[in-house]
Image (cartoon, grey):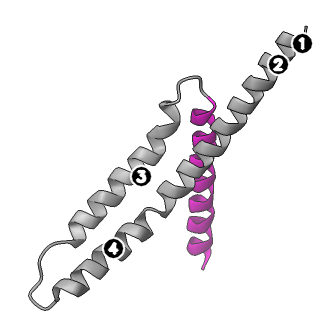
Amino acid sequence: MKFTLIFFIIYLLLGALVVYLQIYFSKMKSRWMGLILPGLSLIVSIIMVLNIAEPSANISTAQRIAMVLSAFITSNIPTIILFAIYAVVRQKLKRQSEIDKMNIKDL
């Protein structure tokens, strides 16, 4: 029980670190920096799907397709979350940049 709580706290801290890094990378001037973590997450999910897709004698084609699709969708949840963080942060930066330009023109 004690180790489970410790591992839970460690995973929670790692998740918070990933979110913080995504926000930090998304705020950088280069827009490509914010796409690093979603890209890595997408690559990991593709590797996971490729590992699942090995042929098996007892599985039909429909079951294999359902299994691969469900694994792909499930493993891309972090990718979607990281990309959403990227989109929100970049949109806020763009809006702030436009406000700054308007303030400069008003002077």
Q: Which residue is mark 1?
A: 106
**Element carrying mark 1:** helix
Residue under the point 29% across and 74% down? 68
Q: Nearer the viewer, mark 3 or mark 4?
A: 4
Which comes sooner in the sequence, label 4 or label 2?
A: 4
Q: Amino acid at mark 1?
A: Asp
- Magenta run includes residue 101: no
Q: Nearer the viewer, mark 1 or mark 4?
A: 1
Residue 66's place in the image compared with 42, above or below, is below
Q: Circles 1 and 4: CB distance less than 8 Å? A: no
Q: Amino acid at mark 3?
A: Ser
Residue under the point 30% across and 81% down? 66
Which comes sooner in the sequence, label 3 or label 1?
A: 3
Q: Which residue is mark 4?
A: 69
Which disc is residue 41 wearing?
3
Secondary structure mostly taken by the magenta-highlighted segment of the chain: helix
Q: Which residue is mark 2?
A: 102
Query: In this rendering, would 38 be left or right of 100?
Result: left
